[in-house]
Image (cartoon, rainbow, N blue to C red):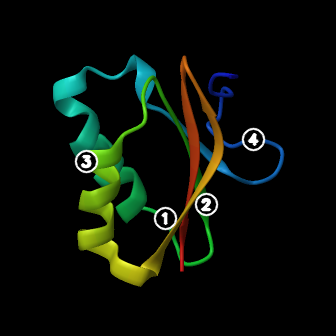
Amino acid sequence: MSGCSNNHVNLNGVYVFDARGIAKRFRHAAIFGAVDALHTGETMRFYNDHNPLPLLEQLAVRYGTGLEINYVSKEPEGVVIDFRLL
């Protein structure tokens, strides 16, 4: 898995959010803030060191069908998930 680019946007116009460097007690708040900052149609590519099932449940409750969640990869060392605001 690759890390963040310097400006946090990759060449495809996808915003990169790498949670692996954020203290675990701050992660969910930071992730919610980042998703809240998306505009309709924008995507955030999320990197994490584990499959965040409780977070995904919280996002589903908070955003309902307004947030598309797609796994880009699932590996033993972590996951990459695209969050797209609809």
Distance between the alpha carbons at the discs numbered 2 and 1? 7 Å
Amino acid type, label 2? Thr
Distance between the alpha carbons at the discs numbered 3 and 1? 21 Å
| Depth check, front residue: 40 or 86 | 86
- What residue is shown with label 1? 38
Q: Which residue is drawn at 69% across and 52% down?
A: 14
Q: Residue 10 carries which label?
A: 4
Q: Which mark is residue 43?
A: 2
Amino acid type, label 4? Asn
Label 4 near label 1: C-beta < 8 Å? no
Label 4 near label 2: C-beta < 8 Å? no
Question: To which quarter of the image does residue 35 belong?
Answer: bottom left
Picture quarter with the C terminus: bottom right
Picture quarter with the N terminus: top right
Distance between the alpha carbons at the discs numbered 3 and 2? 20 Å
Distance between the alpha carbons at the discs numbered 2 and 4? 11 Å
Q: Is residue 29 above or below residue 38?
A: above
The image position of residue 55, as x and y in percent, is 29, 49
The image position of residue 33, as x and y in percent, is 31, 53
Amino acid type, label 1? Leu
Q: Residue at x 61, y 60 (%)?
A: 43
Question: To which quarter of the image does residue 24 belong?
Answer: top left
The earlier-in-sequence mark between 3 and 1 is 1
Label 1 near label 2: C-beta < 8 Å? yes
Amino acid type, label 3? Pro
Residue found at the very far right of the displayed protein? 11
- What residue is shown with label 3? 54
Distance between the alpha carbons at the discs numbered 3 and 4? 27 Å
Q: Residue at x 61, y 67 (%)?
A: 42
Residue found at the very far left of the displayed protein? 25
